[in-house]
Image: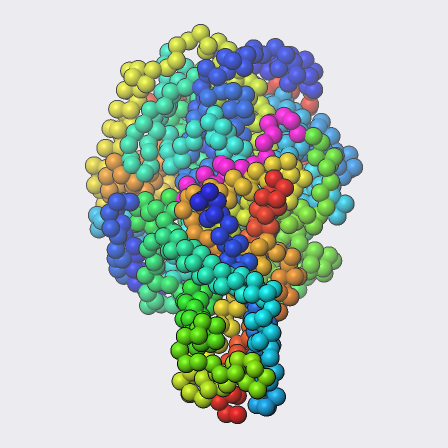
Amino acid sequence: MKITFKIWRQKNSDSKGTLKTYDVDGLTEDMSFLEALDHLNEQLVLKNEEVIAYEYDCREGICGQCGVFINGRAHGPHDHMTTCQLHMRSFKDGDTIVVEPWRAKSFPIIKDLIVDRSAFDRIIEEGAYISSKTGTAPESNAIPIPKAKADKAMDAAACIGCGACVATCKNSSAALFTSAKINHLNSLPQGKAEEHERVEAMTWQMKEEGFGSCTFTGACEVECPEAISITNIAEMNARKLKAKLLG
Amino acid sequence: MALNFLFYRKSLIALTGLFLCVFLVVHLSANAILLLPNDIASELYNSYSHTLRENPLITVVAYVLYISIVLHAVVALLITLHNRKAKPQKYIMDKSQQNSSWYSKNMGILGTLILIFIIIHLANFWARIKLGIGEEVLLDKNGYKDVFSVTYELFQNIWFVLFYSILAIPLAFHLYHGLKSGFKTLGFYHKKGLRILAKVSLIYAIIMGVGFGIIPIVVYFK
Amino acid sequence: MLNSKIPEGKLEDKWRNYQLQSKLINPANRKKLSVIVVGSGLSGAGAASTLAELGYDVQCFCYQDSARRAHSVAAQGGINAAKNYQHDGDSVYRMFYDTLKGGDFRSREANTYRLAELSAPLIDHYVQQGVPFAREYGGTLVNRSFGGVQVQRTFYARGQTGQQLLMAAYSQLYKMVKAKKVTMHARSEMMDLVLINGKAKGIIVRNLVTGQLERYAADAVVLATGGYSRVFRLSTLAIGCNGSAIWKAHKKGAYFAGPSFTQIHPTALPQSSEAQSKLTLMSESLRNDGRIWVPKAKSDERPANEIPEDERDYYLERRYPSFGNLAPRDIASRAAKERIDAGHGVGRLKNAVYLDFKHAIERLGLDTIKDRYGNLFKMYKKITGIDAYKQPMMISPAAHFSMGGLWVDYELMTSISGLYAVGECNYSDHGANRLGANSLLQASVDGYFILPNTINNYLADEMKVNQPDLNHEAFDKAEREVKSNIDKLLNINGSKTVDHFHRELGKIMWNECAMSRNEKGLKEAITQIQNIKEEFWNDVNVTGQGDEMNTELEKAYRLADFIELGILMCKDALQREESCGAHFREEYQTKDGEAVRVDDEYSYVSAWEYGEDKFKLHKEHLNFEFVNPTVRSYK
């Protein structure tokens, strides 16, 4: 199949970017979207042009490193999917595909389609952990955790940190990412001891990084590859209130 | 302290918004009087508005109302400005209609329309009745200010009827999303409860939209 | 020559005896010592955070944009531990024996026992860190079965166990970043190891954003860089996974052990085109309830659901009645290859077998299957577009885990003083084949429990040595070499892409050095790879510059090392004239196609020393004091 790609090219964080058009032939429906870009890059190398920079690692939808805006949607046209899981059979022969990087003030562009998501790491750094040292753990079955509770924690913990929620949010809010982590840890007995400090510090850092605020448009939960529910944000708000009152 | 204010501003919008939602219920129920035959409506409506003006508790509530409207609008403006800064560059191709509703993304525009409405609405009624600006308000046979006539006269003007009725539409959408998400902002996260809340919000928004929208039309044709 | 430093005493006392005898460092002095950790997966992040908790000054590096991307994230099925929660006769000894037997008796007893011994506390450790393992309604932990084992000892968090463990390790790492005891360098790739007076004292790093070369010095260097199965190009590994760090260490003197021991995973998605970059893994746990079969007739073109029961060949159940679909990975993969080669393969390219859940759904109900494997079925549908609740999955063997890696002693130190290797990049516990759900275990145990208790034995003496100096000539020399290598790649300006060479290398490795090997093929492969090497260095085209973000350049220097590693893998496979575990030499098999191990001659670990023209073999003889190596049968 033949596809016209319009891809955002930007030399580095300081320069101005623009959409560049590439006509690519010889693609097949079995190819993943990223393999189509690989194919394009090989052609660019043969023409001695500089290749397009884009990110990926595991290519099976779990590492969270890939992620671009494809035809106006985070990770492409389907709900709950990563860029690497998108296949060319989702497009028709002759289609035009517009590819842009995640856009958010807190995710500055490094090059072409690659952005810097280290703001997420800094939110994690503020308290997305249980402060106990290696070697201090009690026997696991000593603290029973009912299935429903463990399942709920797992639902939130499934976040892969790809940043699609921020990318798709009109306010570039990181509330879904932050709330998922807070709710995962705060809903487990192990995370209780630091629950209030965790909420305060992580939500504070979220604001400090320049993410916008959540207005519950619901776009994030649609684009989230792990389908993490927006209810998590409401729960985080409740935890914040609780932390203010009791913390 | 300033930053701490930022921290709470979302809750502030939600709280003032929810208060305004309650106010609208009261307001609409009173306005429903206007749907009654003119002779009954006139007396009831004037005595009702007289009671409101004379009650000191209502006076306090009125101030809370004014403050709420101002806070709701000002804080929303601040947040919107902040949110815009968080996404300085828009997407060249944007298909966000596939993942979220237009009204949830445009609460600011809807709110601005409502604000314009409120200003004109206040000029039509509040300025005349409470501040005494413009044409003098006459007294009815019970000696109350004839608010009913003010309303009746206003809605003989087709342009005002259209303005009031059409702006009930953005109001409905604003209320639908506002009520739903206001509770979430304040930390209501019970899954089943949220499903019920969504339905309640929809019904509430329809009642408010249809109610406020239909009254001027009914009055016009009466 | 090779001193494995196995402690004295009974099997169950060895680790304790070791700790009693090892040198300690007082907390005030630990602050003065620094450690470099390359890699941020379970072993790397585990080691970095635990060393930092102990007080050492840690610098941690990863090539990805965040430590959370490390490929430990992709492990789906679970992690083994001898907790015996299921009351089904499990014990540390049984787990030790299963692992040793699973590895076809090509690993050290003492190491393997320690792995089993530390497995139970590791589960406690992860639960404490907030890993949401699957639970019973009453709140206790659940276990599932895994291949090669007849007890249930695998703990899991849906189909995302690796991700959940990695999130725990990553969060602990960032806890120590916050405490200012770990400095995290993301988007940083180790380009070379720096030795001073024969000891590992630093690394040269390329900043992947600016392209600048940077120097880092420390009192010890820990490699936690994972597996190298991307040498096959098509594998279940992340695209960025590479063997460069250990290969650079190997070239500086670290021995490479069992390089050809590569696990081919039986349940990956089949290749569908030449352009494919990755073979997605479907968790082995699917074999708990799924049944593997092929049509009895060759080239059967009917859709799977139209093939009646009596025309289906459930070949694993037929060949291995006692383990059935849960036969170990090497055996399941080889059996699939045998059927596919015999013309029974299914799918468009006839390169797959069916994994069928029809009976499981009938027996357990759709809801139970959804609860157990829901996300795997979803993933399968995303990639293939097929609903596996309605028709069987198609799966195929794919290159997966590297049992081989840098040779390490009981302390996890390589043959270079002060250089440690932890996790998949070392050769330690798995022998010639790894059991499912043991890799998360080994990586974690190495990083959290073992290294932090062995590195002190070395660092205690390094207190007396001066802190390494970044201006030392060894750093100058190493950086110069890295720079000239990069310049060379950028200036070839040939006519072929890096991926072209990688595909060529991958094809040769997959055909000759994967599931089944023979002398003729391996010899040819070596010649062909040497030709590829020659052609690569004369005709590759790497666009862009060295002093900028350059993804082509990254691929190129990683491939350059893979090519050299490929040669060593073939040489290792050629030298080992027996079949053991994942290493199956066609010349050494029984009449019905089972592996023939030759213990009299090959009961050793092959540790290769790098030489410009020739690799030199060192043998670490395996001394089985407690267990008698038997023929590995799963029939």
Residue B175 in the image: above or below residue C65: below
Residue name at image x 45 percent, y 84 percent: B154
Residue in view at x 37 percent, y 63 percent: B94
Q: Is residue C573 left or right of residue C312?
A: left
Q: Which residues are magenta?
A: A117-137
Looking at the rendering, in which quadrant would you find the C terminus of chain C?
top right
Residue B4's x, y, as percent?
A: 48, 44
Magenta-drawn stretch contains A135: yes
The answer to whether residue A58 shows anywhere in this view is: no
Task: Count the labels in the image.
Answer: 0
Tell me if residue C384 comes above or below residue A58 in the rendering: below
- Tell which of C446 and C49 is nearer to you: C49
Q: Examine the rendered structure and indicate whether residue B193 appears above or below residue A50.
A: below
Query: Measured from the top left, where is residue C172 in percent x and y?
Result: 54, 33
Which residue sits furthest front? Answer: B143
Q: Is residue A73 left or right of residue B13?
A: left
Q: Main secondary structure of the magenta part?
A: loop
Q: Position of residue C41 (x, y in %)?
A: 50, 35
The residue at 52%/62% (across/down) is B63
Quadrant of the rendered image containing residue A168: bottom left
Quarter assignment of residue B48: bottom right
Tell which residue pokes out farthest to the bottom in this image: B222
Q: Name the residue rendered at 70%, 35% in the picture.
A: A140
Q: Is residue A213 magenta?
A: no
Percent position of residue C487, x then y = 23, 33
Q: How is the image coloured?
A: rainbow
Decide if residue A49 is in sight here: yes
| Nearer to the camera, C75 or A202 | A202
